[in-house]
Amino acid sequence: MGPKPKKKSDGKSGKSKKGKEARRRAEAQLRAEQEEAERLEKERLYQEHLAKLEAKYQEGRETELAELNSLEQKFLSAQQWKMDYREQAKWEHYLSCDGTPDPTVPREINTFVSLWRDDHDEDIQHVMGKEEVVLNLIEKLEFLLLEASPDEITEEQRDQYQELILQLQDLLHQKYNQATQNLLKRASMYEDSETGNMHTVIKDKNTTFCIWVNLKKKASFESFVFQEAGHGFVLPTSLALLSVAVRVLHTPYDHLSPLWVQCQGLPRQEASGSRDSAEHPQGTAQEPGEEEEEEEGREEPSVPPAEETSSKERKSSASLNENSNNTDDIKETEEETEKNSDMLDELSQEGDAPLQEAPGGGAEAPEVVDLQQLLPLGGVYHIQALQLPPQARDVGDWSVVELLDVGLEVYPYSPEVAEDGTQAPVQITLRLPDNVIYFQVPVVARWDPAGQQWRTDGISNTTYEAEEKSITFGMGAFYTVALLQDAHLNLPYQAWEWHPTAVDEGLFTVTAVFATIQIQIKDNQCMLSSVVVEEEEVLSHITGKWMSPFGLRAALKRAGVNIFPAEYSPEYVPVPTKVSEHLTAGSAQDNDWSLYMFSDEKVQNLKLTETSEAFSEELEEGSEFHSTLYHMLKDSASSEAMDKVERAGFKFIDSVYQLLLATRVLAYS
């Protein structure tokens, strides 16, 4: 067979493939150029549209601001109404002649403070009765500082009221110390027949006072529980044979934390309820020369070194649950009075021991609490070991008591050293208040009076029982302690809604991280309708009660439902914003929500949604720029909605404004 013929290459076929490829590239390039041209044209048209909107915005800006100014006249009307209301309240208080002072009148409050300070023979029940009056005076001053405009009170008056609050808080704690001292002088009269020691619990709606006195001094004694209060302690072995008392004084108010705010130079954001002062401020509401004249007119009476009472009087005072007058025979020198006036300083400096080595032997790094992140909740627990004063002894038909001029003395306790060289802590168990919600395990902190701050060092072995509402922990010494909670744990809000229910009435619903809160608003008052946690309604003690927006905010914060961001909260909670119109009761539909962006000068409605993959400043179709959110919403709102806004009364508008300003739902949802 001969050789096979060679195949010739198909030139036409190769040229055809190259031509097709070239055409495809040319078509792709043409499409890309067309798409780019379309994009540029679209961008040009969009920029022209923005320019027109900007021009229209600038043209109408002055008109919008003038309209807004007209609407703001309702706030001025509300402010004037509040001023008139306060003046009317002052007049009604004057006519009532109920014996309580007006805290804004220097002469009245000075008389109240002076008379109470000079009364040294009070018992615990009497102090608790006066405490209600003092707390009301403090609340009035704090609400006045929050609500009053600069035209109503001067800066000098503000400083005066703030220092007066300190003075009242300081005096209140002084009185508890004096009453404790009066009780300890007669501790042996109330000896328990079973244990041989003395113990009692005295409480009202504000304060719980627990005290145990070691009268028998048995080495076998280990621990004690105040059954009526649920608080308890394990007594260190070194104290079992000593004449000491253990006091647990629980106040639902916190007079200490604002001292940290003051030291930090931060503005006070809200009414705090009260505060313990580690220093004694001078009388700030006094008129010029008043204090000096009073001091010059004093005489120091001579008093015998012991007091004597008849056995009949002694026996009649044996009940702790009755108001006793048998202490009228007690006399104190002026020198003792002066020392007692410094009692709070002594207790703060000695009872709240300085930094000590942590239980377990190793030195623990100091932990200073940042009160912008953690806030005391449920009040303050003053836990102290006190030295027992000389007890009354019977001499015939008389009871003789040796008087000391040292006031209430704190026992200088130091942590015990165990056999292995570690320091044994003081073990404390506290029953948490029923009217407070702890959404997380509370942080136990102790007050450091020297640094004016809360610290977590010196606290160890914390055990929290949520069901039993109790917490047990160890302390390096006897401290004043508080239970702290994250200030932002309910932020950001999951959702919020506002809808009208009637003329000048509405329902405000906030769904927070751990709770759903519903607040009813009517005219100038608010009412907590419900707080639901895990499908269960809670806080029945404050639901269904009408109060001012400021009062409601304070009540919710005291109860542990903090939905009120502070100026520094953006450092902890970054969030977007959203708004939806409501005309009637009920929830908004998913497609009713809009997303808005705010700048210093304008508001704009964005096209994107919260589920969009990327952020874009592209405007929603048909929307425009506006200088305020009010005018932005007016663009898309119905005439019925705007009619409701324009017809709303100024008191109702102010209440809604106060709640929205306090919760800042636009920023924290």
Image (cartoon, rainbow, N blue to C red):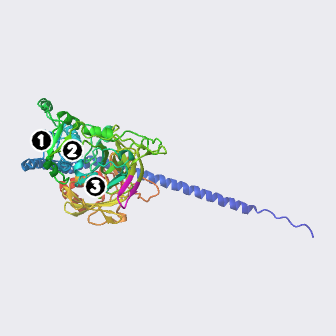
Whole-number angstrom distance, CA of label 1 to CA of label 2: 42 Å
User: What secondary structure is the stretch in magenta mostly built from?
Assistant: strand
Quadrant of the frame with the C terminus: bottom left
Picture quadrant of residue 396: top left
Quadrant of the frame with the N terminus: bottom right
Q: Give the residue number, with chain letter if any, for mark 1.
A: 108
Residue 492 showing in the rendered view: no
* Label 3: element kind: helix
Circle nearer the N terminus (3, 1)? 1
**Looking at the picture, which amino acid does disc 2 mark?**
Arg
Locate residue 405, reporting x and y percent.
22, 36
In the rendered structure, find residue 556 and report the number of the disc placed on it. Answer: 3
> Considering depth in this image, is 395 or 653 the residue closer to the camera?
395
Q: Are marks 1 and 2 in contact (CB under 8 Å)?
A: no
Q: Give the residue number, with chain letter if any, for mark 2.
A: 393
**Looking at the picture, which amino acid does disc 3 mark?**
Leu
Locate residue 635, reporting x and y percent.
29, 57
* Label 2: element kind: strand
> Considering depth in this image, is 221 or 460 the residue closer to the camera?
221
Circle nearer the N terminus (3, 2)? 2
Locate residue 572, reporting x and y percent.
39, 48
Locate residue 510, reporting x and y percent.
31, 59
Circle nearer the N terminus (1, 2)? 1
Q: Tell me which segment is drawn in magenta.
A: 463-472
Q: Are marks 3 and 1 in contact (CB under 8 Å)?
A: no
Relative to residue 295, is residue 417 drawn left or right?
A: right
